[in-house]
Image (cartoon, coloured by chain):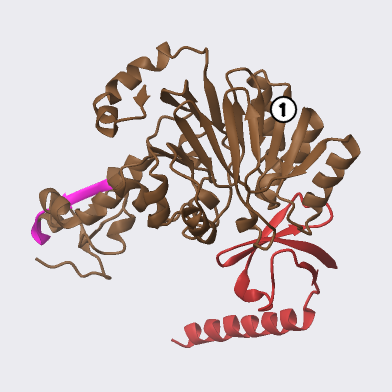
């Protein structure tokens, strides 16, 4: 999905983003996670995708770690 | 009531102020309401002859609160609405206000902003046929005996905060300065301009942020009272400690909407009184906290050498980061390691308290 936001203002390290079109809700977004040239008044499209690959990889790694620790405990 | 002429007299008569709250006579009074809208600005001005001006309307979700506040003060129309600049924490609530109240004229910054909120607000002014004017340096608004002058801006070549309309209001001897979100750059320009910006009451610029309220500016304005409008526990660190410190050091009576709620200043042009929704006196609270920190070593000596919490079984050096988390009401003090051990307490692993 896509979220369209207005950069209403920049308060020190936070960009205050208003979610269009209603702008009833706002997000305080750390400036360091936005492109360098962001300015007040910019309108941004935020694209949101699920990263299933990273999720599955992570699940596998964490599952393996738990199994490893369980085995280790039994051996001791 | 406070006198404008003599600061020492002011202090001497501080007790009288408390006594005189109930005796303030309503006639010939100018009332300025710094409405608590959380993080944002909204200021209602009621003149002695019942003319009204609203400066900003808070954020969109606070519009109905401002509307309710105006209603509960028997206000059903506004002669002027000033929107200092297009940021949503200043104009959002005006959407409700323009819809709920008959408005004589809107004075706007004329600064282009792309938010839908600002566009909707302009569209509403257009559709309702409300008179619209861009406020520029030198403009004056006369509300009976109350005179309001626009001190800034003279163009739109500023960023949004610094495009804020700055107003100086005069009634009798009383002067009020409303800074919007103007920052250091504007303060410097105002100092350099030929205008006399001396004012008794300062609405501190930009919610008390560190980018506003310089020493030079405070020196020039020399206010007796400062009002900071900001939200409780806001995400932006408003007000900045440096601002609070500067106001304190200059012995300026400071009120904060996050701690005092809505603050109302009433004046007959000779003297004034301040009503606050909540009694907590902000500036002294801040000051006390600071003082406590500076005096910690001494303060702790009198209490004991080590500190523990009634909620745990560890004892710490007073400077330990865990000790700092102990609530004052849970503190238990020990003079020695033996005393702590005897009470069943164990040494903290982080600070390893030793005699």
In the image, B342 versus B187, the foreground residue is: B187
- What residue would you read off at disc 1? B78
Please name the residue shown 72% across and 28% down the image.
Answer: B79
Q: In the rendered image, which quarter contains the C terminus of chain A?
A: bottom left
Is B168 above or below relative to B263? below
Q: Pinpoint residue B131: horizontal percent, then vertical percent.
A: 82, 36
Q: Nearer the viewer, residue A10 or B111?
A: B111
Q: Is residue B114 left or right of residue B20?
A: right
User: Which residues make up the magenta segment?
Assistant: B330-338
Could you say where residue B163 lies in the image, as x and y percent from the top left? 64, 56
Q: Which chain is red?
A: A
Q: Position of residue B63 (x, y in %)?
A: 71, 37
Chain holding disc 1: B
Measured as percent of width and height from the top left, residue B275 is found at 46, 25
Q: Is residue B337 magenta?
A: yes
Residue visible at 36% across and 47% down? B247
Identify the residue at the far front of this view.
B194
Rendered image quadrant of residue B298: bottom left
Magenta-span inclusion, residue B50: no
For the residue carrying disc 1, how many other residues have a C-alpha within 10 Å: few (<14), some (14-19), or many (20+)? many
Q: Which chain is brown?
A: B
Q: How many marks are shown on the rendered structure?
A: 1
């Amino acid at each position: 999905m896509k979220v369209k936001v207005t950069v209403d203002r920049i308060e020190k390290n936070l960009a205050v983003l208003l979610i269009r079109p209603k702008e009833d809700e706002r997000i305080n977004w750390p400036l360091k996670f936005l492109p360098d040239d962001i300015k007040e008044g910019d309108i941004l499209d935020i694209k949101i995708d699920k990263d299933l690959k990273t999720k599955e990889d992570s699940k596998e790694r964490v599952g393996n770690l738990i199994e490893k620790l369980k085995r280790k405990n039994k051996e001791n | 009531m406070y006198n404008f002429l003599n600061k020492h007299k002011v202090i001497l008569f501080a007790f009288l102020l408390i006594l005189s709250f109930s005796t303030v006579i309503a006639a010939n009074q100018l009332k300025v309401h710094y409405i608590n809208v959380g993080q944002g600005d909204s200021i209602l001005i009621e003149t002695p002859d019942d003319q009204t001006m609203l400066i900003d309307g808070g954020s969109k979700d606070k519009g109905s609160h401002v509307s309710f506040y105006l209603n509960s003060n028997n206000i059903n129309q506004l002669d002027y609405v000033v929107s200092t600049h297009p940021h949503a924490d200043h104009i959002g609530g005006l959407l409700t206000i323009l819809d709920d109240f008959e408005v004589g004229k809107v004075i706007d910054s004329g600064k282009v902003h792309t938010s839908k909120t600002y566009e909707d607000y302009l569209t509403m002014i257009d559709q309702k046929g409300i008179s619209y004017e861009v406020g520029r340096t030198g403009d004056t608004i006369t509300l009976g005996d109350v005179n309001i002058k626009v001190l800034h801006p003279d163009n739109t070549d500023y960023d949004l905060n610094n495009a804020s309309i700055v107003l100086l209001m005069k009634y009798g001897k009383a002067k009020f300065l409303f800074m919007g979100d103007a920052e250091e750059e504007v303060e410097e320009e105002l100092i350099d301009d030929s205008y006399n910006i001396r004012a008794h009451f300062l609405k501190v610029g930009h919610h008390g942020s560190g980018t506003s309220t310089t020493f030079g500016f405070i020196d020039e304005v020399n206010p007796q009272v400062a009002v900071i409008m900001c939200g409780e526990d806001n995400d932006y660190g408003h007000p900045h400690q440096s601002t609070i410190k500067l106001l304190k050091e200059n012995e300026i009576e400071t009120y904060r909407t996050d701690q005092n709620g809505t603050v109302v200043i009433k004046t007959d042009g000779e003297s004034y009184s301040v009503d606050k929704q909540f009694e907590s006196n902000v500036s002294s609270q801040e000051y006390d906290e600071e003082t406590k920190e500076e005096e910690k070593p001494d303060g702790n000596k009198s209490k004991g050498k080590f500190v523990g919490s009634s909620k745990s079984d560890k004892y710490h050096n007073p400077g330990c980061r865990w000790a700092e988390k102990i609530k004052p009401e849970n503190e238990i003090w020990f003079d020695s390691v033996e005393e702590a051990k005897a009470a069943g307490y164990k040494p903290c692993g982080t600070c390893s308290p030793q005699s």
